[in-house]
Amino acid sequence: MKQETLMKPTNDLVFKALFGQESSKEYLKSLLEAILDAKISDLTLVDPVLKIQDLDDKSSILDIKVLTSEREQIDLEIQITNQKHYSNRSLYYWARMYGGQLENGQQYRQLKKAICINLVDFVHFQGQADFHNSFLIRERNKGFTLTDHLEMHFIELPKFGYNKEKVLETGNALFHWLFSCVMQTDLAKRM
């Protein structure tokens, strides 16, 4: 008898099928709004291959790349394998995405915000209880923001999994999205 396999939403292909298709743009928009806690009027899925400047550049392919109606770029990554230097990889993707905006002759004022969102199925920040950590560039001593053009989010699914009760206590859309993702993954692990 053939055993049914439950496809986990944390699987790269399943994740891209759920959120990276033109037909699923509304789901993607809803997920991004929940993560960023901001309204997005419209978005466009764009080629996830980052441009290389010369043949020696490392090629990079994002999981899902989005351009908002405000011309902000968003990289949405799903990662199940714990990599020691994953933060550096995310920063590299951000730098390539941000640096690839301008063509010859364009002005720096034309640069728009670039956001990297990392959904990770492992504990990335040891000793930190929060499952959602958001980073900006801030002055070290006084804490004021240099620019809002760099924004990085790390959502650690295992940490959320320990707090499933919070979903019932709140109407927060992010909790509901992550609850669905974590529950499907937990169910698949038990099979």
Image (cartoon, rainbow, N blue to C red):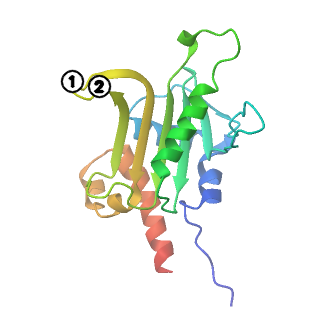
The answer to whether marks 1 and 2 mark residues whose Cβ atoms lie closer than 8 Å is: yes
Residue extending farthest to the front is 56
Q: Which residue is mark 2?
A: 139
Label 2 packing within 10 angstroms: few (<14), some (14-19), many (20+): few
Mark 1 crowdedness (10 Å alpha carbons): few <14, some 14-19, many ≥20: few
Q: Secondary structure at mark 2?
A: loop
User: Looking at the picture, does residue 6 appear above or below residue 136?
Assistant: below
Q: Which residue is mark 1?
A: 142
Q: Is residue 152 left or right of residue 114?
A: left
172 vs 30, left or right, is: left
Percent across and percent down for residue 144 are 27, 22
Residue 33 in picture, x, y percent from top left? 44, 36
Residue drawn at 74 percent across, 39 percent down = 56
Q: CA distance from mark 1 to mark 2?
A: 6 Å
Q: Nearer the viewer, residue 83 or 71?
A: 83
Q: Residue at point 59% right, 47% down?
A: 19
- The amino acid sitting under disc 1 is Lys
- Quarter of the image containing the N terminus? bottom right
Image position of 148 (left or right of 44): left
